[in-house]
Amino acid sequence: MRVHVFILMMAWLSTAIVSADDSAAIHKLIVDINAAAKTNKARILRIMVINTDVAALTLEQEKSRTGLSYGELYVAHSLAMASHKSFNQIVALKASGQSWARIAQMHKVSLQGSTAALKEMLKE
């Protein structure tokens, strides 16, 4: 089930057109992940590892190095995968003052499907 959800999410990320609701969807995604991390950090890290293919230790190091929250790390990695950019390139855009929604728009990526996919994984 997890692989199926991941594949559906990645297909959505790579083909969706950015809409006006992306800012709200990205914000909600970040809030949901951060809330889940407060409840069960180990579980959200496992979900992030499954969906980003980035080791938990690497995610923790990136969190420490960048100051991003778990939700922001997830968004940054999702945008990087969908746009075929590196994580560091996406983080540099964010550090330069770009919003997550603007970065997504610049790369013609939508994260709206990620919230539904994440909620499905959190139910398991």
Image: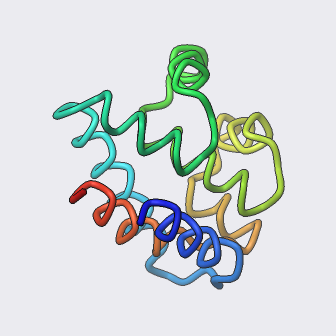
x and y, in percent, of residue 69 in the image = 42, 32
Answer above or below: position of 118 versus 54: below
State left or right for residue 21 relative to residue 108: left
State left or right for residue 85 relative to residue 101: right
Report the residue that reaches farthest toward the front: 1
Residue under the image location 65 percent in, 64 percent down: 104
Residue under the image location 30 percent in, 49 percent down: 31
Residue under the image location 67 percent in, 58 percent down: 103
State left or right for residue 18 relative to residue 93: left
In which quadrant is the N terminus drawn? bottom left
x and y, in percent, of residue 67 in the image = 51, 22
Q: As rendered, which of 30 and 113 lies closer to the eye?
A: 113
For the rendered model, the colour scheme is rainbow
- Residue 90: name its quadrant: top right
Report the residue that reaches farthest toward the left: 39
Q: As rendered, which of 20 and 31 lies closer to the eye?
A: 31
x and y, in percent, of residue 33 in the image = 33, 46
- Residue 34: name its quadrant: top left
x and y, in percent, of residue 120 in the image = 30, 66
State left or right for residue 45 relative to residue 17: left
**How many numbered marks appear?**
0
Residue under the image location 29 percent in, 63 percent down: 119
- Residue 86: name its quadrant: top right
In which quadrant is the C terminus drawn? bottom left
Answer above or below: position of 101 versus 73: below
